[in-house]
Amino acid sequence: MLSQDTTISPDTAIREIAIARPGATAVFRRHRIDICGDGDTSLSQAALQRGLSLTDLQAELSGLAGEGDELPVEAGALIDHILSRYHDVHMAELPEAIRLARRVETVHQIKRGCPHGLADHLALIFDDLQGHQRKEEAVLFPMMRQGGGPMIGFPIARMLAEHVDVVEQLEELARLTTNFVPPQGACTTWRALYEMCRKLDEDLREHMHIENEILFPMFA
Ligand SMILES: [Fe+2]
Ligand SMILES: [Fe+2]
């Protein structure tokens, strides 16, 4: 399977990229490459058929890979990292996951293992996370950038409590997707969806870990 940090070769099949690289489905959709119909086509063939530059397409797909994980040590820089690596990424990826889930639930509604309720659950995660991140961005992080202060314990306690709720939502996400394992014979969209959910789970847990264990203690 294609790993996160490998460069995508021109010979790699569309299907393989869609499953291994979360976010790739959105790139393909933008370029009208059909991940089901064109699944067996190689990246270079798909680019040729759609009149796209292979180099640009490869660069776009490689840009989706996670970067190296040296965390900044200074609070302001760490906040910048959290915003660009997690807040922005969740907000960009969740609508695509919701869209894929709606499609899978509609097309495969009578199939065994169909994740009924997944799109609604992802939408709930999206709404709650939007509110949570807004509070961090508008209240907590600006306080931190100004050095903290005696009142900072209150917003921190509130965010910690909300993180506990997110963990519960992730447990439900794992249940709905049978721990991110699609049923045998699942189509490319279904598999790409579960891979996106797996990445969301991983990213969100990592995001909360950095806040709970590294950023918040700097001001406790
Ligand atoms: Fe956050
Ligand atoms: Fe948070």
Image: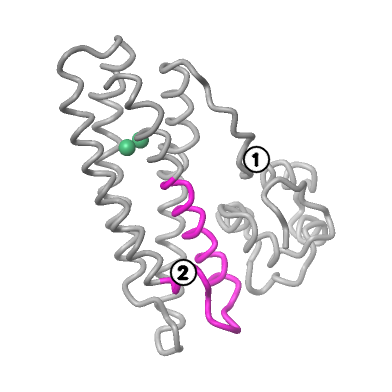
Question: Quarter of the picture for ligand 1?
Answer: top left
Three-letter amino acid code at the position of disc 1: Gly
SS class, disc 2: loop
Residue drawn at x 36%, y 69% as measured from the top left: 118
Foreground of the two, 165 or 125: 165
Quadrant in which the N terminus is drawn? bottom right
State the mark number for residue 179. Answer: 2
Total numbered circles: 2
Residue drawn at x 77%, y 58% as measured from the top left: 43
Image height of 217 relative to 40, above or below: above
Q: Along the horizontal axis of the image, is 11 left or right of 83?
A: right
Majority secondary structure in the magenta region: helix
Q: Position of residue 214 (x, y in %)?
A: 41, 28
Q: Along the horizontal axis of the image, is 144 left or right of 97?
A: left
Image height of 26 relative to 67, above or below: below
Few, some or many C-alpha atoms within 10 Å of disc 2 (few <14, some 14-19, many ≥20)? some
Foreground of the two, 46 or 5: 5
Residue drawn at x 63%, y 67% as measured from the top left: 35
Q: Nearer the viewer, mark 2 or mark 1?
A: 2
State the mark number for residue 210. Answer: none
Q: Answer with the quarter of the image where residue 34 lies.
A: bottom right
Image height of 112 relative to 101, above or below: below
Three-letter amino acid code at the position of disc 2: Asn
Few, some or many C-alpha atoms within 10 Å of disc 1 (few <14, some 14-19, many ≥20)? few
Q: Position of residue 85 (x, y in %)?
A: 50, 35
Foreground of the two, 4 or 18: 4
Image: magenta residue range: 177-205
Sequence-earlier tag: 2 or 1:
1
Q: CA distance from mark 2 to mark 1?
A: 27 Å
Quadrant in which the C terminus is drawn? top left
- Residue highlighted by disc 1: 63
SS class, disc 1: loop
